[in-house]
Amino acid sequence: MSPSADVEAKRMSYPVDLNQGTVSGSGAPVVSAPTTQNTAENVAVAAEPTSSVEQALAATKTPPVPVAIAAPEAPKLQWKEFRIKSGDTLSSLFQKAGFNDGVMLSVIHGEGEADKLQRLYAGEDIRFGLDGEGNLAAIELQRSRLESLKIEKTEDGYAGETEVREPEIRPAFAAGVIDGSLYLAAREAGMDDRLTMELAGIFGWDIDFVYDVRKGDRFEVVYEQLYIDGEEFSTGRILSAKFTNRGEENIALLYTDSNGESDYYTPEGQSMRKAFLRVPINARLSSPFNLQRRHPVLDIVRPHEGTDYAAPPGTPIKAAGNGRVKFAGWKGGYGRTVVLQHGDNITTLYAHMSRLGKGIKTGTRVKQGQTIGHVGSSGMVTGPHLHYEFRVNGVAKNSRTIKLPDAQPIPKSELARFKQVTSQSLAQLNVFLESQNQLALATDN
């Protein structure tokens, strides 16, 4: 867009003629420069306009008028949207949008992350953008409220990239008193199932939430509430929590160390995590440790040197702690079995499996929580379950009552930073607790 004639006229009204030493223009006075010899001193003087010239310029000079240049509008697309269902394929979705497999192949062979379009899941939303001529100009695959895959037409084909939105995080608080179970109390307090499982996992090293929890036990939790566009849509991590079990208070604080590793600790810096899981499976106890138990198959008194957990076939079995696979295979009446060696003097045994975990064989290193097998009914059993043994120096111990060794506490070099960070988390928890107490008093009155 060019400046208007008025603007150009104003900018060019009074050009300075350096050769003649005059300023000319319609209605402007003409001033002659004095004739001088061309000395260095005189050149400097001659370069300066006379006061009359300055006045003329000042009177007529107009600042340039800014001109906005409109950006060309992006062509509007016509969108065809679909909710992906079970059984849908990428090819069938392209056909619904009116495109053949040739177009589909040109898209997934495009640049960037365009090939990720091949991974589709039921429940996701996909839309195809068509230009004015009906050609495919863009695709948007909404994987979640936070993540989307966007593909656009380029000069060379198609190019895709994944966009991830960062949610707004606000602290939230929930509290409850257990009457029947933690699950019911947490749901009544407004906690979702994932948050409840996380709470149980934090304190589960010391508390058996199936057998140790009593009526009147209570919990208070500060957690992350996630927002998108000002609306709640999910929960994040637990930031701090307090669980009172049989009158004993347990406090856990989330801490991220200087290496970026996050875990839960007591206010004193002791790890909430233990070197061993108290229970290596998500299942109910069916037969406890009992050295005087009558065997259900042989009908004789035979020491039951482990703990049985009944579960459906295929239920994952986890390694109770870091260690090495000492044995993996068939072991007489134990059936398909894995034995792990933890350090010099502790072993754990997992029996009656239907199959071993992926990559589990003698000599393999495993990490705590890793799936080492799946529940079955191999060996001498009456039904599918896990038989779990915990031995110290070869002697069987009750895995549900033995004092488990702690994981590593906060190192001394990190302790000052830990205290500084977690003191704020603890103060935040106390503020929520005080607010809750005041609300309870106001309600009672």
Image (cartoon, rainbow, N blue to C red):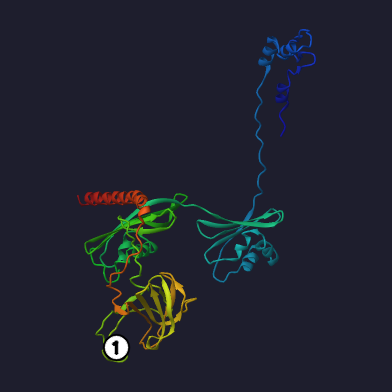
User: Residue 64: horizontal and vertical position, in percent?
Assistant: 66, 26
Res. 99 visible in picture: no
What residue appears at the point 30 percent right and 75 percent down from the top-left corner?
A: 399
Q: Tell which residue pokes out farthest to the left in this image.
A: 445
- Relative height, residue 101 to residue 301 (above, below): above
- In-front residue for pair 90/147: 147
Please, what is the three-letter code of the amino acid marked with disc 1? His
- In-front residue for pair 434/319: 319
Q: Is residue 217 left or right of residue 261?
A: left
Q: Quadrant of the N terminus?
A: top right
User: Residue 334: horizontal and vertical position, in percent?
Assistant: 38, 85
What residue appears at the point 20 percent right and 52 percent down from the top-left corner?
A: 444
Q: Which residue is mark 1?
A: 295
- In-front residue for pair 298/55: 298
User: How packed is label 1: few (under 14 Cα within 10 Å), some, or many (20 or more)?
Assistant: few
Q: Is residue 228 left or right of residue 383?
A: right
User: Residue 379: horizontal and vertical position, in percent?
Assistant: 39, 87
Q: Tell which residue pokes out farthest to the front in this image.
A: 344
What residue appears at the point 38 percent right and 64 percent down from the top-left corner?
A: 193
User: Residue 21: horizontal and vertical position, in percent?
Assistant: 77, 13
SS for callout 1:
loop
Q: How many marks?
A: 1
Res. 87 visible in picture: yes
What residue appears at the point 25 percent right and 65 percent down from the top-left corner?
A: 179
- Relative height, residue 59 to residue 400 (above, below): above
- Residue 272 position by quadrant: bottom left
- Relative height, residue 68 to residue 266 (above, below): above
- Relative height, residue 171 to residue 35 (above, below): below
